[in-house]
Image (spheres, rainbow, N blue to C red):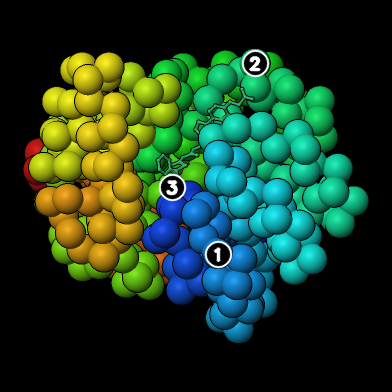
Amino acid sequence: MKTRITELLGIEAPIIQGAMARIADASLAGAVSEAGGLGVIACGGAPLDWVREQVGIARSITDKPLGANVMLMDPNAGALAELLTELRIDVITTGAGSPANYMQMWKDAGIKVIPVVASAALAVRMERLGADAVVAEGTESGGHIGELTTMAVVPSVCQAVSIPVIGAGGVADGRGLAAAFMLGAEGVQMGTRFLTVEECTVADAYKERVLAAKDSDTIVTGRGSGHPARCLKNKFSRQVRKLEGDMAKNGEALEELYLGSLRRAVEGDVDNGSMMAGQVAALVGERKTAAEVVAEVMAEAEALASAGLAGVAEANARRARMI
Ligand code: TUI
């Protein structure tokens, strides 16, 4: 399948692996790139030495294009931006802010820059700055999120910019990819679907919770503090929500609760960790390899696309009867 995204990035399948802080390392990113998608090493909160090492390991896993993500709220973002330029990473995705300060440096180095945006206004700003593409991310996503749903933000961003758009948030299978294409996207980004693959090094207890999740098992924390993030319901997220009921009184207690919460989750503390995951955790029910996921999503999307609308209705009815 060829789109402006596969052409721009030199990849076979228009599937970008979502950056997941403290989770998406060389093992996962290398496997996704080798499978024909774009693997992305999540650098958010990571020491520079770790990033250098992971880029090296990923390049020993695959010769194909490789991405890295810069989380712009990270105090280390500037140094990281320079390191990734020095390492000549092929693609940089950014999240949780504007990459304006680094755009020229990355463009001069020939790096493809793909900011993640949650609104058309930011997408337009990114296009003006020289972004090669944008990820339009809906509020169904795991982690730090905006307000708009994928169904609304993808077409809205598509009609606001002329650079190619990648749809994200609520995409976990071929149905999601086909739907995102119907909305005007030329690629998709999936995080949660890749969380449970064999090559993902997150603790097994975290994977088990994602595999068992139902559609109403995620919750948004941090709305009060202006940093909303979607994660699985557990003791940690329920406690956060409770304390958020009185921010003035509980500010310090909340800060303490958050401290180290991502690390606890990825190490397998499923009660006290912040287990970020998207609403599509409900659609992730089995363990596969990254290559199996990429192949399955592509095959399903292609079958749906060639079936036409009547064929799609029939396929979905058959699926419903199976469940
Ligand atoms: O960045 C993400 N998702 C993330 S980052 C992350 S790390 C984290 N760790 C602990 C607590 C909270 C987060 C986990 N998940 N997605 C991309 C994304 N970016 N979604 C929304 C945005 C966004 C929001 C506002 C981008 C830009 C923006 O404003 C920029 C501006 O200049 O107005």
What amino acid does circle 1 point to?
A: Pro
Q: Which residue is mark 1?
A: 47
Residue at 67% across, 51% down: 92
Amino acid, disc 3? Met
Q: Position of residue 210 (x, y in %)?
A: 21, 52
**Viewer-proximal residue among 65 and 71:** 71
Quarter location, residue 216:
top left
Q: Nearer the viewer, residue 37 or 226?
A: 226
> Which disc is residue 38 wearing?
none
The residue pinned by badge 3 equals 190
- Foreground pick, 78 / 157: 78
Give the mark, 2 or 3, whose residue is nearer the N terminus.
Answer: 2
Q: Position of residue 152 (x, y in %)?
A: 46, 17
Considering the numbered disc 2 on the image, is that residue within a helix, a strand or a loop? helix
Q: Position of residue 262 (x, y in %)?
A: 33, 52
Q: Is residue 128 above or below residue 6?
A: above
Mark 2 and mark 3: Cα distance apart in space? 23 Å
Q: Which residue occupies 35% across, 34% down?
A: 229
Q: Residue at x 54, y 35 (%)?
A: 96
CA–CA distance in space, label 2 to label 1: 32 Å
SS for dot 1: loop
The CA distance from mark 3 to mark 1 is: 25 Å
Dot 3 lies on which element?
strand
Label 1: how many Cα within 10 Å (few below 14, some 14–19, many 20+): few
Give the mark nearer the N terminus: 2 vs 1: 1
| Residue type at tag 2 | Ala
Q: Report the front residue among 282 and 173.
A: 282
**Residue under label 2:** 121
